[in-house]
């Protein structure tokens, strides 16, 4: 019974105090730009494109004004080179894969 009470007290203390301290992640410069311009943040673009193109990995590089270039790989090990342009509420992208195929798409958010 005493162990249960001690464990319960420690758990409650951890929940009240928190596990990560008072550190808050600072937004990237590209996220600050995107927010100011009403554009999607890097994490949103990463999620939406990975889902749309079925990518297992992706690297984004900001090119300014809320736009990006990206490389990624799908589950079949096909690699992609992607160009991403944004306007408020819309992401437009063009891609070329390692098999020579090309495509484009747009996503509203």
Image (tube, helix red, strand yellow):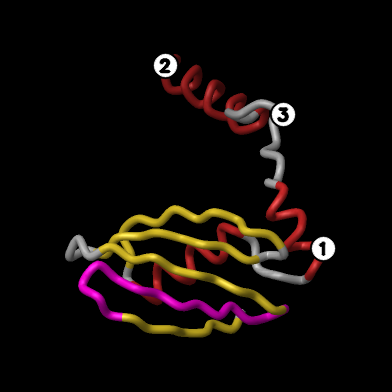
Residue at the spot x=55%, y=80% of the render? 92
Which residue is label 1 attached to? 36
Using the numbered discs, state the Cα–Cα distance from disc 3 to disc 1 in whole angstroms. 26 Å
Residue 35 located left or right of residue 71 = right
Q: Disc 2, disc 1: CB below 8 Å?
A: no
The reply to whether callout 3 and callout 1 are in contact (CB within 8 Å) is: no
Density class for disc 1 (Cα within 10 Å; few <14, some 14-19, many ≥20) is: few
Instruction: For mark 3, give the secondary structure.
Output: loop
Q: Earlier in the sequence, mark 2 or mark 3?
A: 2
Depth check: 40 or 7 in front? 40
Q: Which residue is mark 2?
A: 3
User: Which residue is the extreme one toward the front?
Assistant: 100
Residue 96, percent from left and from top: 35, 73
Residue that numbered label 3 is attached to: 22
Please say whether residue 5 is one of the residues in the magenta stretch: no
Pointer 2 or 1: first along the chain? 2
In reply to whether residue 92 is colored magenta, the answer given is yes
């Amino acid at each position: 019974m005493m162990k249960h009470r001690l464990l319960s007290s420690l758990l409650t203390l951890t929940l009240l105090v928190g596990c990560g301290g008072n550190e808050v992640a600072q937004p990237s410069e590209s996220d600050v730009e995107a927010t100011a311009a009403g554009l999607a943040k890097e994490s949103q673009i990463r999620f939406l494109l990975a889902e749309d193109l079925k990518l297992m990995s992706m690297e984004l590089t900001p090119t300014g004004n809320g736009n990006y270039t990206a490389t990624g790989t799908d589950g079949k090990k096909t690699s992609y080179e992607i160009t991403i342009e944004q306007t408020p509420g819309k992401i437009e992208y063009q891609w070329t894969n390692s098999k020579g195929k090309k495509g484009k798409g747009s996503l509203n958010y």
